[in-house]
Amino acid sequence: MRPSFKTWSTPVTHELSRLIPCNLCGGTGFRFHFACEGFGYVRCRTCGLVQMNPQPEVAAVARRYQDAYGADYLAYEQANEASFLGLQELALSDAGFFDLEGAFFAQGRHALLDVGCATGALLALLRDRGWETTGVEICTPAQGYARDVRQLDVRGLPLEENRFPDGGFDVVLASHVIEHLNNPGGFVREVYRILRPGGRFLVTTPNIEGFQARLFRHRWRSAIFDHLFLFSVKTLSRLLIDAGFRVLRVRTWGGLAAGSAPKVVKGLCDRGAKAIGLGDVMILHATTCPGGILRGR
């Protein structure tokens, strides 16, 4: 059995790269995880984080979204905008985001940041629901589209370079972003800094321990050149907790990719994977409030 497609990615090219320690625990001992065409992943022997290693330099990664491939990325996002927006809404609902709105708005708290907002479709929807919205998108064509067409406040610098004020946001969203970053630990710490006490962080990313990843391994649709890290619920939870967050809720979904099995089989796998927390994608809902971890599927 083969997946019908992999997620869109920039082409595999030769870039400056270097060996790096584990971004989660700082360990330097790794074991082979799997090899893809032109790149590969290792798993930290200490904490289990899966990462591309050697890893391309920060400047090389940034250029992927700003040069010729930026236009291709925008076209991909525009072509899939409706389906992606629907999935984002379902994920946020599953994670309890929309249940927060009434309480937050009653307190006059409605500053929201969407990191990696692409065309701004979700940001525009949330603006219309009453949120005071800001976006971050480093793909130059996508940032321009969200800014000029949707009239959104979207910044073109990486999150850490925007110098947002301490505690400036009530909610930060990051959907399918953290796996693209050279330093996800630094990113999470920056999110914690810019959230107010009691603020919420909702982060969505592929699940390396999900059913699809286990079945397809190096042929998994999320094992792509642009994904520098592949998280599990365990490793992403630890990353958040180490930064000071408390994880409130975990949800996963997706059993098999469309076209990889008959619809009846796919439906059964999708329902089963979600029920037992082995979905292909996961969302973690965390807060800056201290306390013990509470996980749920």
Image: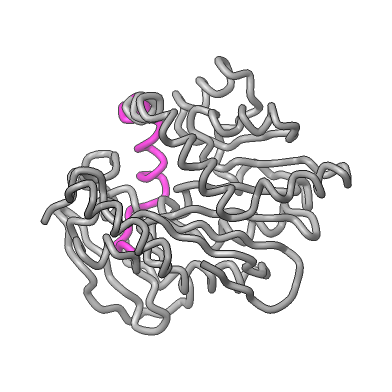
Specify the segment rendered in magenta: 51-71
| Farthest-out residue, left | 1
Of 220 and 34, nearer the camera is 220
Q: Is residue 128 visible?
A: yes
Outermost residue on the front side: it is 264
Residue at figure coordinates x 29%, y 39% from the top left: 8
Position in image of residue 162 (x %, y %): 65, 41
Q: Quadrant of residue 152?
A: top right
Colour scheme employed for the rendering of this structure: one colour
6 is higher (above) or lower (below) than 216: above
Residue 275: percent from left, percent from top: 42, 65
Q: In the image, what residue occupies the spot 48% across and 59% down? A: 183
Residue furthest to the top: 149
Above/below status of 198 relative to 93: below
The vertical placement of 44 against 103, above or below, is below
- The quarter holding residue 135 reads top right
Q: Is residue 155 left or right of residue 145?
A: right
- Where is residue 218 shown, x and y percent of the image? 19, 60
